[in-house]
Amino acid sequence: MIVDLHNHVLPGVDDGPSTELEAILLIQNAAKNGVTHIVATPHHRNGRFDQDINEIKNSIHILNLLIQEREIPVTILPGMEVHLHGELMQELESEIMTLADSHKYVLIEFPAQLIPQFTDSIFYELQIKGYIPVIAHAEKNTEIRRHPKKLIDLVNKGALVQVTAGSVTGANGKDLQRFALKLCQHQMVHFIASDAHNVHKRPFLIQQAYHVIQQKLGKELVTYFQRNAHHVLDGVEFETLQPRFLAKV
Ligand SMILES: [Fe+2]
């Protein structure tokens, strides 16, 4: 059972597939990667896309029917990639879909360049209410790349970290690959996910990513990542490895 916690597979809702056929091709690509459970995470509040929880659920219902008709061994579950914004707490109960509808894990995207000033306070408020923030594609954030210690601080305060499969495989460039693997090696990562958007440019590279991690860092870490994703699906908390200090890459 392989769970993917971050991707854009729903047709016509964001910059993922625009048609049902494209979505099916992408899901077939996931199945070839051994993925059995896809938590669909359309962009929300990123300046281009906003989502409605009921529309997400409806879209997933239709997509699951299409998948069953074609006997593809994959199940789609609801989620959202929420751009970090000042009104997040007010929207939490009514407008934000947690990962796998867990009412616990919230996938949060930072702006590309920086960690917003209010990150600490929003993450704190989330945790007071029993939620756990998951930082999406942390390796791509410029401030985190310059100051990895800031990511350790967030992890030490209870945030979890997702790194993108394409960064681990080198598909997103050698620099990102080196940094993504450093983060994994220093136990600053909790999940590998595809962030898949389409079959051609941003496919599910999750099997390749796990293969690279197994080769370079060992099978135990792969098992850890896979188990962690499974726990999110179950909506339960889990033990994490203690991050090791990483001053610079
Ligand atoms: Fe994404």
Image (cartoon, rainbow, N blue to C red):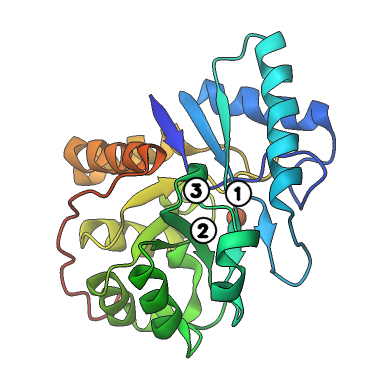
Residue beneath disc 1: 41
Q: Secondary structure at mark 2?
A: loop
Q: Residue at x 63, y 9 (%)?
A: 71
Q: Secondary structure at mark 1?
A: loop
In the shown orientation, is residue 176 left or right of residue 26? left
Residue beneath disc 3: 99
Q: How far across and down, in percent of the image, does residue 216 sit?
A: 24, 45
Q: Residue at x 66, y 51 (%)?
A: 42
Mark 3 touches mark 1? (CB < 8 Å): yes
Q: Report the quarter where the C terminus lies.
A: bottom left
Residue beneath disc 2: 173
Tell which circle, 2 or 3, labels the residue nearer the N-terminal end.
3
Q: Residue furthest bottom?
A: 117
Q: Residue at x 56, y 25 (%)?
A: 75
Find the distance from the CA under tag 2 to the CA under tag 3. Answer: 28 Å
Q: How far across and down, in percent of the image, does residue 14 sit?
A: 76, 52
- Which amino acid, mark 1? Thr
